[in-house]
Image (spheres, helix red, strand yellow):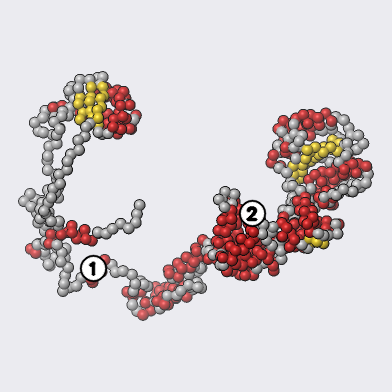
Amino acid sequence: MSYEVTATRRRPQRFDDLVGQEFVAETLKNSIKSGKIAHAYLFSGPRGCGKTSTARILAKALNCQEGPTDTPCGKCSNCLEITKGASLDTIEIDGASNNSIENIRQIKDEVLFPPNNSRYKIYIIDEVHMLSNAAFNALLKTIEEPPEYVIFIFATTELQKVPATIKSRCQQYNFRLVAIDKVKQCLSEAAAELNIQADEEALYWIARESTGSMRDAYTLFDQVVAFSDSHITYEKIRDKLGLLGIDRMNMIFESCAYGRTDEVISSLDEFLQGGISIEQLISNCSDYLRSLMLIKNGIKKESLLGNSPERYSKVVLGAWNPIQIERALSIFLQLYRDIRYSISPRYELELAFSRLCWISQYVSNAEVKKAIDAAQALLCGNSTQTSAPAVSAPVTPAANTTAQTVQTNQEQQRIPNGLPRFSMLDNPPEEEGNQEEAQNPFHDGGPLPPEQSVAETVEPEEPKKLDERLILHVGNETVDSSAASKPVYVVPVSEQGYSVNPDDEDDGWTNVDEPPEEPYYPENYENYDDFEDSDGEKAGTSNGNAGQNDAKLKLIEALSVIDVFAANAVEKTDGWMVKASEVETTIASEYEKGILDKRIQTISEELSKIYGKPMTFVVNLSQVVPEKKQQTQTSTELPEQIKILMNTFKGSIIAGK
């Protein structure tokens, strides 16, 4: 007989053989016993958990010659044909390759004919989510009201892709992943059938790698059996499949706990040279750190850890706290996502292990907040734990003061462990009778106030010499020594009534109550149009409707709404000349002139609105002649105050951008 893989050889043939699907098996058995058989079933769940096998068992239970029964015999012709896949009345269809509407039409034509030699005609459609929308719609009427001898069984791994109209017409059963303990037990039975000796640790590893899929577990089991030579050990699996193993994981993580970066990098190089892939290395390290995290949280279940808790390094468990282990696990989970886009996955791996070498110094935000709260309670003299105020009878002020003193002393005694104690807080100044110092527990430290500092630093025998110009002269005749009010200071004023500038040379600036009246325009002009500016040009227009400045401002205001760039350029123009139907101006920037040239028509229209007649705007590029700067030498010496400031603030720039 030809070789048969373990997954096919150990396919369940009865409901009791289903592993990890007790709910589905019991529900189907009870429905068969009670005769409540639905016309459509929908099995959903991950791969390799028994959906197709359950569909075949249900078909045998319904078409068994001794049935319908929840325990098919497996020996009659119908059961044997269904097991071999040769039954004419149990049709298995692959939904991925028969997903068109023509295949569904063929099914609709076939259901009109009764079964050949069975009780029911059963259609098993695997991967039903691969059917097209048209195929689903064509199948709706058939599965809603099929003939009494037709039963549909759908199986899918992606339930979300099945339309709701199909789900509502079927009984739904959700299949779950198989627990690791049950997978390991099935592997032990498979090894016993083949007369193969298998270690518990090796079977645990195979069960964990299957991630709850029985088909994956049996497939990996066949692969391990092929190179294990009738004895499956974890060492053979580790060497052949490129795994690290618990012992080598303990070794490299102990080096990280001790902070020996050189040993860690050397061990990584040895592992990579031995054929272990970076992805496998990261996966094994993540599993190891996850197991450490579970142990730190009090979980000792071997099926979750993958090994017995005693096999994990006590050094690593003692060196890292749960928060640091969680941080290390997050580093490797992020590393697995980053290596896909990294310039060198090996560099990323070495960087992650280098970070693990100082992970013992990592402090979380929660720990920092806890330390700050403890320090705050210490410095403020308050305990972090406060109790609810008790209702008591009123007390006298003296008794209240004594109670507060006792409470303060008690709060000072409750200092968190591990924090320093200030000796000055043990004996408050108020106990010694110094009420002035009792107001401030840190009376001996800190800078003095500015007034007190100045008063103590100035020597009385050598007073500081101030500039005579900055001294405020106080007239003695205005000071009334007997009065309780402050003295009146008399400030010298000039003949015009202004305060005198302390500088020797008057610079023309004075402190006045009201500015002098200086006419902005000449007193003898009658019309705004006749006024000439400092350049000798007319400020108004020829018709007197608006002055040059008014026209320019109105134009800028109008352009600011429709074109900001043109408004900014008009603002920079100079030398406006208003003619009969033309406004001519100049501008210094060639770039700004280009902006105005492009908007001549818009500007001309706005000028026409301002002047009330058609106007044309002309802009020319001005010829700017640079003036020669004459250097003048002054023999005047800088004032003493300027020299002091220059000497005080002189320095050099040592950094900056």
Please identify, in this view, whether the residue under mark 2 or under mark 1 is nearer the observer.
Answer: 2
Q: What residue lies at 22% left-to-right and 70% top-to-bottom? A: 455
Q: Nearer the viewer, residue 431 or 474?
A: 474
Q: Residue furthest left?
A: 495
Crowd rating for badge 1 (residues with CA inside 10 Å; few <14, some 14–19, many 20+): few
Crowd rating for badge 2 (residues with CA inside 10 Å; few <14, some 14–19, many 20+): some
Secondary structure at badge 1 equals helix
Judged left or right of residue 426, residue 555 is left
- Identity, as a three-letter code, of the amino acid under mark 1: Val
As measured in the structure, the alpha-carbon distance from the residue carrying label 2 to the one carrying label 1 is 71 Å
Secondary structure at badge 2 equals helix
Q: Which residue is mark 1?
A: 454
The percent position of residue 239, horizontal first and vertical second, equals 72, 60
Write down the quadrant of residue 629 in the picture. Answer: top left
**Picture disc at residue 609:** none
Judged left or right of residue 269, residue 646 is left
**Picture disc at residue 279:** 2
- Identity, as a three-letter code, of the amino acid under mark 2: Glu
Q: Residue furthest bottom?
A: 432
The percent position of residue 1, horizontal first and vertical second, equals 89, 48
Q: Total label count?
A: 2
Q: Residue furthest front?
A: 273
Judged left or right of residue 486, residue 69 is right
The percent position of residue 275, horizontal first and vertical second, equals 67, 57
Q: What residue lies at 12% left-to-right and 39% top-to-bottom? A: 518
